[in-house]
């Protein structure tokens, strides 16, 4: 195989961007990896243990850092992309501080933003103490400070599925796909860390479609005694003892149910990132009804955009887990190499 | 003091905190597979009793777990312990033993009469 030449700008230094940058560099291409935060790693930096095997997220982060440890990669951290324009077969990518970078192709790896749970006001995030998000809980696990606002250990913990997903009221019709398994994983972690606590998951459907998810669900029931109550939580209040009170219909019984809870964890869904939306508008990139980037073809073009030379990797196209994100990033690399071969002919 | 404000109807709401879930605890301790139920209703679909009367083991399962014992106690008498439900269960719950243990627990509470 003749040596590949070409330069690629990868926008976003999370899981997808890091993996793609590493693979592109291995193929001999020169890569500029642009990340808006000061460190690479994206959301993975905030997670504690990953499903399905509950390995430390740091192990995956270490792998990704080794991937980008390559002389062909120029890392620009703490920088945003203000826009890009085409010049013949090339692109000129401009950074926020006025730098222009030439590229033969652009890879969008702008990832996702977590749904802002305060938008579901009825759940009381930002209003009541001890209503937290799945992301807050990961940070609590990471920092070893699993406790209520008053410093005490929670006795009963509720987990609310589908916060910002499958909910027309917030304009998100899609399923974020990872929250069910995250809920199960976090329920087990809670029970492991606080053996005396009881955990209840409030769900609409249990969507355990990934490898080993169903097994995890069963382990949560049998080994950790996690309770599952089918019903969409309608609202959360506080009673005179300053305990949270959850209102839900137990749809399997067909009657309303109320329950006191010490801590409530909201499974925040995934949304198209603000940065992605801005670049989609700036670059005339098509987005779907779910606001994520719309791939050129759902079956065989999931890494391609409607603009020649611009490609997608990872959760900027749809909710994905780490495994899928890494595979998707590798797929993008294949498409980019194919594209470069054809334009360089 | 004058009571005012809004409250859920006492008659229908499942008051999880007021309910007694010791019957479910008794079963779970002796038959851990009770905890693996996913409320699919396979047991109720195959049940002979259920096809002729208003009887659903799935419903009884959930009532026990929520501590709605009075309802569960009455309903569970109908089971003939044939065990067909345990042949269907996708989670391998020993459903027959669950019924047996539930009856035992109620009897131990001395308020169960066949």
Image (cartoon, coloured by chain):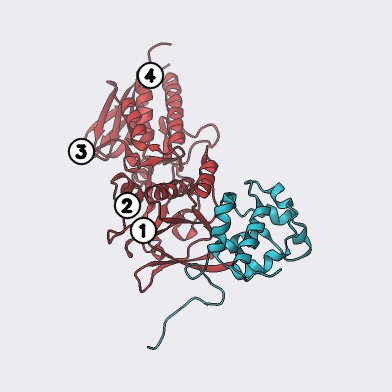
Chain colours: A red, B cyan
Q: How far separated are the C-alphas under marks 3 and 1?
A: 47 Å
Which residue carries the number 2 mark?
Answer: A146
Chain for numbered disc 3: A
Which residue carries the number 3 mark?
Answer: A97
Disc 2 crowd, CA 10 A, few/some/many (<14, 14-19, 20+): some
The answer to whether tags 4 and 1 share a subunit is: yes
The answer to whether tags 3 and 4 share a subunit is: yes
Question: Residue A319, how many percent across, how many down?
Answer: 45, 43
Where on the picture, by quarter, is residue A53? top left
Q: Which of pointers 3 and 4 lies earlier in the amino acid sequence?
A: 4
Look at the picture and state if A252 lies above or below A205. below
Which residue carries the number 4 mark?
Answer: A27
Q: Nearer the viewer, residue A225 or A277?
A: A225
Q: Residue visible at 74% across and 53% down? A: B46
Find numbered disc 2 in the image and state the secondary structure of the residue it sits on.
loop
The answer to whether tags 2 and 3 share a subunit is: yes
Find numbered disc 1 in the image and state the secondary structure of the residue it sits on.
loop
């Amino acid at each position: 195989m003749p040596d590949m030449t070409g330069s690629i700008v990868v926008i976003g230094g999370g899981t997808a961007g890091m993996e793609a940058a590493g693979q592109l560099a291995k193929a001999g291409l020169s890569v500029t990896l642009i990340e808006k935060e000061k460190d690479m790693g994206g959301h993975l930096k905030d997670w504690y243990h990953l499903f399905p095997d509950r390995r430390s997220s740091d192990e995956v982060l270490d792998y990704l850092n080794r991937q980008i440890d390559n002389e062909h990669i120029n890392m620009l951290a703490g920088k945003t992309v203000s826009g890009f324009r085409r010049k013949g077969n090339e692109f000129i990518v401009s950074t926020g501080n006025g730098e222009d970078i030439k590229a033969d192709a652009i890879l969008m790896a702008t990832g996702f933003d977590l749904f802002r749970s305060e938008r579901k006001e009825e759940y009381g995030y930002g209003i009541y103490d001890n209503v937290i998000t799945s992301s807050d809980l990961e940070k609590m696990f990471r920092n070893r400070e699993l406790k209520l606002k008053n410093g005490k250990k929670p006795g009963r913990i509720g987990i609310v599925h589908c916060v910002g997903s499958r909910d027309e009221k917030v304009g998100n019709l899609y399923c974020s796909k990872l929250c069910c398994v995250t809920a199960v994983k976090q329920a087990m972690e809670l029970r492991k860390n606080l053996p005396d606590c009881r955990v209840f998951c409030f769900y609409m459907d249990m969507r355990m479609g990934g490898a080993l998810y169903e097994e995890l669900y069963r382990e949560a029931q049998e080994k950790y005694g996690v309770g599952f109550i089918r019903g969409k939580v309608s609202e959360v209040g506080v009673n005179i003892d300053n305990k949270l009170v959850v209102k839900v219909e137990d749809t399997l019984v067909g009657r309303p149910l109320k329950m006191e809870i010490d801590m409530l964890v909201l499974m925040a869904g995934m949304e198209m990132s603000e940065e992605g939306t801005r670049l989609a508008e700036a670059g005339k990139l098509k987005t779907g009804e779910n606001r994520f980037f719309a791939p050129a073809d759902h079956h065989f073009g999931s890494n391609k955009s409607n603009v020649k030379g611009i490609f997608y990797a990872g959760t900027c196209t749809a909710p994905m887990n780490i495994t899928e994100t890494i595979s998707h990033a590798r797929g993008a690399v294949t498409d980019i190499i194919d594209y470069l071969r054809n334009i360089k002919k | 003091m004058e009571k005012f404000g809004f409250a859920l109807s006492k008659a229908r709401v499942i008051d999880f905190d007021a309910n007694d879930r010791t019957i479910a605890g008794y079963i779970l301790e002796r038959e851990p597979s009770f905890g693996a139920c996913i409320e699919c209703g396979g047991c109720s679909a195959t049940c002979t009793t259920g096809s002729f009367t208003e009887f659903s083991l799935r419903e009884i399962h959930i009532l026990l777990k929520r501590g709605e014992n009075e309802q569960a106690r009455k309903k569970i008498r109908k089971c003939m312990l044939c065990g067909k439900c345990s042949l269907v269960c996708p989670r391998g719950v020993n459903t027959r033993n669950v019924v047996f243990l539930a009856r035992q627990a109620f009897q131990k509470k001395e308020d169960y009469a066949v």
